[in-house]
Image (spheres, rainbow, N blue to C red):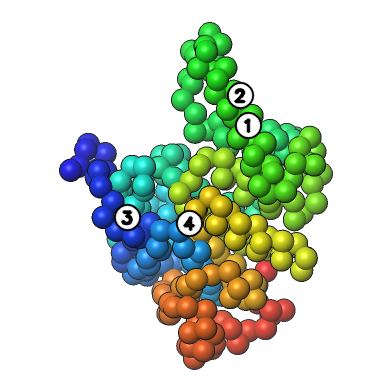
Amino acid sequence: MSDATGTTASVATDNIFDVQNVTMRFGGVTSLNNVSLQQRRGEILAVIGPNGAGKTSLFNCLTGVYHPQEGIINFHAAKHGTVNLVGKPPHRVNHMGVARTFQTSRMFNALTTFENIKIGVESGQKTGPIGAMLHSPRMRREERESDHRTLDLLELVGLTHRLNTMADSLPYGDRRRLEIARALGTNPEVLLLDEPAAGTNPSEKLALAELIRTINKETGTSILLIEHDMRLVMSLAERIYVLNFGEVIASGAPAEIQQNPEVVAAYLGVTEDEGDV
Ligand SMILES: Nc1ncnc2c1ncn2[C@@H]1O[C@H](COP(=O)(O)OP(=O)(O)O)[C@@H](O)[C@H]1O
Ligand SMILES: [Mg+2]
């Protein structure tokens, strides 16, 4: 059954994402060429590939920032049924259950940790400007709920002790955790993380990996991860897709990917220091 928005009522698949033949061009540049990818519900899936391979473009297509010229991006939401996300604006995609963090930090620097997360939580709430002006009972209830939810998220990402710290004075690793908490505030079914460990030190990396695992286990959120640190990817991901020049050149379990000659040539042969950061 379909309604006017093209959503269907039932979810008859174990996949959360079913991306089919997506092509994204910018003038003469093809950043994604006929990319197909499936993510299982609840899975931690990684996308790797050299700088410029099209990883962020893929995330932009999955979140409504880019509208690919060709292909289908079926999102099988438990809440809303199946939706083709192509052409949907980012805020709608987010409301349907897709949240993301960005490769470079996008925080409200002059707000506290608590306030930054609360913005994520409140973006999903229903009270409009009239309700807010009248200070309606629903608004007061939502306010209490969003405070509780924000505190829960602070605890989940280990930032309770930084509740009143301005975002711009947080240590770098904590900023990355804050971004994750803010994205989780929108209650996503799938969380897209674009290089969450970039620029962090080895102990922060380990802690981030642990956090991603915890989020996946405790909230059941599917995780789609772009990451350059191979140890992190290999230890976290259940499956990996490899992009090179906008094309999927391999997919499979970490052990298969590590042994794939084409992948080694395109990417893994590059040492960490030579790889992009
Ligand atoms: N908005 C855009 N306009 C023009 N070219 C773009 C745009 N976004 C991405 N590209 C191009 O697409 C290619 C892939 O970029 P990107 O998706 O950022 O790669 P990655 O995240 O794997 O490093 C690059 O050649 C990049 O210049
Ligand atoms: Mg990128």
For mark 2, what is the residue?
144
For mark 4, what is the residue?
222
Mark earlier in primary sequence (2, 3): 3
Mark earlier in primary sequence (4, 3): 3
Compared across the picture, whether 16 is left or right of 178 comes to left
C-alpha gap between disc 1 and disc 3: 33 Å
Secondary structure of the residue carrying numbered label 2? helix
Mark earlier in primary sequence (4, 2): 2
When asked about the image quadrant of residue 273, the answer is bottom right
Does the CB distance between marks 4 and 3 fall below 8 Å? no
Does the CB distance between marks 4 and 2 fall below 8 Å? no
Secondary structure of the residue carrying numbered label 4? strand
* Residue 32 horizontal/vertical position (percent): 41, 67
Compared across the picture, whether 59 is left or right of 202 comes to left
Secondary structure of the residue carrying numbered label 1? helix
- Is label 1 within 8 A of ligand 2 (CB to nearest ligand atom)? no
Instruction: Decide: few, some or many residues near mark 4? Use Cα within 10 Å; few <14, some 14-19, many ≥20.
Output: many
* Residue 161 horizontal/vertical position (percent): 80, 42
Mark earlier in primary sequence (1, 3): 3
Mark earlier in primary sequence (4, 1): 1
* Residue at 50% over, 53% down: 221
* Residue 236 horizontal/vertical position (percent): 58, 69
35 or 186: which is nearer to us? 186
For mark 1, what is the residue?
148
Compared across the picture, whether 194 is left or right of 1 comes to right
For mark 3, what is the residue?
74
